[in-house]
Amino acid sequence: MISSNIFFTLNSLSYSHITCRENKAEHNTTTDEILLFDAEVPDSHREQLQKLKLNLVKTQQTATQERLAVTKNSVDLAHKKANNWGETRPEWGLAKNAGFIVGPRELTKNHNLDGRCFLHSYDWETDENGKALKAIMQGPMVVTQWLNNHYYFSTVDNKVFGGGSKITHNITGKFGVVQGNGGDLKMGLPLQSVMESDLEMYHQPLRLSVLIQAPLSRVSAVLARNEHLKNLLDNKWIYLMVMDPLEANTIIHYQQKFSWVTANQESATKKEVEMMTL
């Protein structure tokens, strides 16, 4: 099982103010179950909490139906596969990840992303000071890049950067695994998490592409104050695209050293380079 810690937020609206309460949850990627750690949720938020739980059950059903290509008993089948020792590859929940989209759900809800993109809800119009965007870019965007990198290196060289085959894993010191009866501790994902067979890849080792719907000036302001993010972009560990709502949702690509180019300009430049090299 690959579990990921997530957060859920419940809002309480009164006449005088809005109260937000953030709580933790865990996503089991083998069954698509999301477990809410809700012991400290106050009674004032219980109704919202119950609605959230019902929606998560429905989401689990539709997610497993799509992933397992069945219409009935998909959750039961997911549990069966996750607990079957004969299933060597149940942890494909995050495999093939390639993108991170920051924007309103309406932006992608009519598109089949084939489970390859992480989605983060964001409305630039309600984020007047840009604090929410800053938190997303410095937090979830970086964590998503870590996950993407984990899969990337575990795929391109599983022997060195991955975990090797689970068949010959031996638990060592209750904190790691080795292959067989010795050798170095394995640092990455097992072979079965990224490979479809001994020779054929299941995960495609692509560096993370990020799309943010927000004014370019706000995204630039966050980058200007964060050298770590600029390093990730300048070294092409993240390919950043901004959909600027103030410019009719024009797509603008980040280039090295804090320069930007629109999608049309980039296509034209590529054509010119191709013509020059003929």
Image (spheres, grey):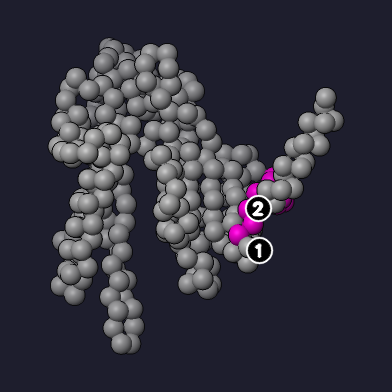
Q: What amino acid type should be assigned to the residue bearing mark 2?
A: Ile
Query: Label 1 belongs to which residue?
Result: 247
Q: Answer left or right for 176 relative to 45.
A: right
Whether 89 is drawn above or below 268: the answer is above
Q: Position of residue 195 (x, y in %)?
A: 39, 21
Query: Which residue occupies the foreground of this view, 52 or 63?
Result: 63
Q: Residues within 10 Å of mark 1 (few under 14, many from 20)?
A: few
Query: Which residue occupies the foreground of this view, 143 or 248?
Result: 248
Q: Please say whether residue 259 is one of the residues in the magenta stretch.
A: yes
Q: Are marks 2 and 1 in contact (CB under 8 Å)?
A: yes
Magenta region: which residues? 249-261
Query: Which residue occupies the foreground of this view, 239 or 232?
Result: 239
Q: What amino acid type should be assigned to the residue bearing mark 1?
A: Glu
Q: Answer left or right for 233 relative to 147.
A: right
Q: Position of residue 176 (x, y in %)?
A: 29, 27
Q: Going 54% across and 51% down the picture, which residue do you hit?
A: 211
Q: Going 30% across and 36% down the picture, which residue do you hit?
A: 67
The kind of secondary structure element at disc 1 is helix
Q: Position of residue 136 (x, y in %)?
A: 47, 57
The kind of secondary structure element at disc 2 is strand
Q: Residue furthest right?
A: 276
Q: Answer left or right for 68 relative to 135.
A: left
Query: Label 2 belongs to which residue?
Result: 252
Tag nearer the camera, 2 or 1: 1
Q: Residue 266: which disc?
A: none
Q: Residue furthest bottom?
A: 15
**Total labels drawn:** 2
Answer whether residue 147 is visible to the viewer in this image: no
Marks 2 and 1 sit apart, C-alpha to C-alpha, by 10 Å
Magenta span: chief secondary structure: strand
